[in-house]
Image (tube, helix red, strand yellow):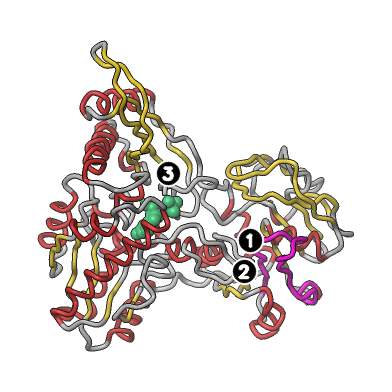
Amino acid sequence: MIVIVDFGSQTTHLIGRRIRDLGVKSEIVLPQDAFKSIKKLVPRGIILSGGPASVFGKDALLVDKKIFELGIPVLGICYGLEVLGQMLGGKVAPGKKKEYGPAFIKITAGKPTDLFENIPNELRVWMSHFDQVVELPKGMVGLGSTSAVKYAAFADENKKIYGIMFHPEVHHTQYGQQVLNNFVIKICGENPLLGTKKIEEIKQYLKKEIGNNKAVCALSGGIDSSVAAFLTNQVIGPNLTCFYVDTGMMRIGETDEVIDTFKNKLKLPLVIINGKKDFLTALKGVIDPEKKRTVIGETFIRIFEREAKKIGAKILVQGTIYPDVIESQGTQHSHKIKSHHNVAGLPEKHGFKIVEPLRMFYKDEVRKIAAESKFPPEMVTRHVFPGPGLAVRLIGEVTEKKLDILKRADKIVIEEIKKAGLYDQIWMAFAVFTGIKTTGVAGDERKYGELIAVRAIESKDTMTSDWVRLPYDVLAKISERIVTEVFEVVRVVYDITTKPPATMEWE
Ligand code: XMP
């Protein structure tokens, strides 16, 4: 097994998941417990994760230096590389240029290194840092540079200690899995085990957590809650009741699609709740995105409580997946990015025992489970939609009028992307109501109207994403249709930002 020391990166758990993909076990430990845990677990390798701290700041997080003397191979990633640089006698300093998102690394190692075996000499990687190592520790040799970082990779191959500034665990880093494979299998000498039997493990967990009790599951129409409900239904049968709350912040036609899928295709017991009034009332005057998220989380749970009481259920099954947990601050040293409505958006007091069978999984793993469970194919490939719905795609106060404009614009985006045959290649595409008023001219008259932004992105695991290079013709058609068919809109812009530094949703 491999020990991962968690310095609080958004992607620490993803490193574990990538190692799981290699068929190897891993365990995440905290920096302050690292030495003790490593002595106990006797891993074949140690990975130091990234993290938001600075090695020379007041809040610097370091490890007991003795872990470098155990003869166990070490790989430091991003902040983990800086920890190596600082603790082994080099020098770390603030960089002149921040690197967030894509960068190109050139492998400069004079001789072939095991870490970069079967990897080209130049690759596009994903970075997220400010500090950098400016002087190498004794015995370390530089292995690669980017335009902003001289020592973007280094190693002491005799001691099998390696540092890389980029994140090999994220999908957007080219050959990232190969780098991890080289470290885990080649350098640490791990043996891949057979793949874990995920579905059976999830079912056993559900049996243990729910037993003979009644449970409710809130369906959003998305794949995560659908898979959670489907597997729970297989384990507890009629003891499960599914709710679908129409928040009024769904896309056009969405509620009908959900009813058709669950009632007719998956044959799950479904209760439809009209929550539109509850949500719009609760969101009155709310502008701050984090406040919106908590208000929505709370409104959902109060509706669930009300409905669950009617059938005497005290267990709530949620389709939470790991990225929801980590972005809502799921580990000791990580920063909060946003409160996903189903995690940090939950009020402290509620009357449920929460059961989250998918909490440790990523979206692409959930999609695989769905495909293996014979879900209708259109569900497996359906674009992701956030639990808080259009509220986080509408900047400013949510009102019925703004929602209506956004829904009509969003429908056009999806229609044109489907027409162009691009829907299945995209993680998600949508319109954003930016809340910015802008000047236009229509029929020779001045028109002061809304600005709609269009976003289309691709991702695999939610942690990073790139914007889709939509053909100009498709963008042109989307823009043309929105400004002519959605009368209130005078201007359309396309969002060309990666994650990081932007998140996928605008709020
Ligand atoms: P961000 O915007 O954080 O989005 O880059 C990552 C993915 O998560 C979805 N998302 C949510 N899903 N509840 C959800 O169920 C939420 O509160 C929430 N916030 C974001 C988002 O649509 C994207 O697919």
| Callout 2–callout 1 Cβ contact below 8 Å | yes
Which residue corresponds to the image point at 33% horizontal and 41% vertical from the top-left?
Answer: 430
Three-letter code for the amino acid on which mark 3 is drawn = Glu
Separation (CA) of disc 3 from disc 1: 24 Å
Horizontal and vertical percent position of residue 133:
79, 52
| In this rendering, the label closer to the viewer, 3 or 1 | 1
Q: Which residue is mark 2?
A: 6
Whether disc 2's CB lies below 8 Å from ligand 1 is answered no
- Residue 51 circle label: 1
**Mark with earlier residue (3, 1):** 1
Above or below, comparing residue 410 to residue 490 in the picture: below
Magenta segment, which residues? 44-68
Q: Secondary structure at mark 2?
A: loop
- Indicate yes or no: mark 1 CB to ligand 1 under 8 Å: no
Give the dominant element type of the magenta stretch: helix, strand or loop.
loop
Distance CA(mark 2)–CA(mark 1): 8 Å
**Residue at the far right in the pictured view:** 138
Quarter containing the N terminus: bottom right
Among the two numbered marks 2 and 1 on one chain, the one whose residue lies closer to the N terminus = 2
Q: Are marks 3 and 1 in contact (CB under 8 Å)?
A: no
What residue would you read off at disc 3? 458
Ligand 1 shows up in which quadrant of the image? bottom left
In the displayed structure, does residue 157 sit left or right of residue 318? right
User: Relative to the observer, which residue lies in front, 106 or 208?
Assistant: 208
Residue at the spot 31% in from the left edge and 50% down from the top edge: 391
Between marks 2 and 3, how big is the CA–CA gap? 27 Å
- Which residue is rendered at x = 81% and y = 75% of the image? 69
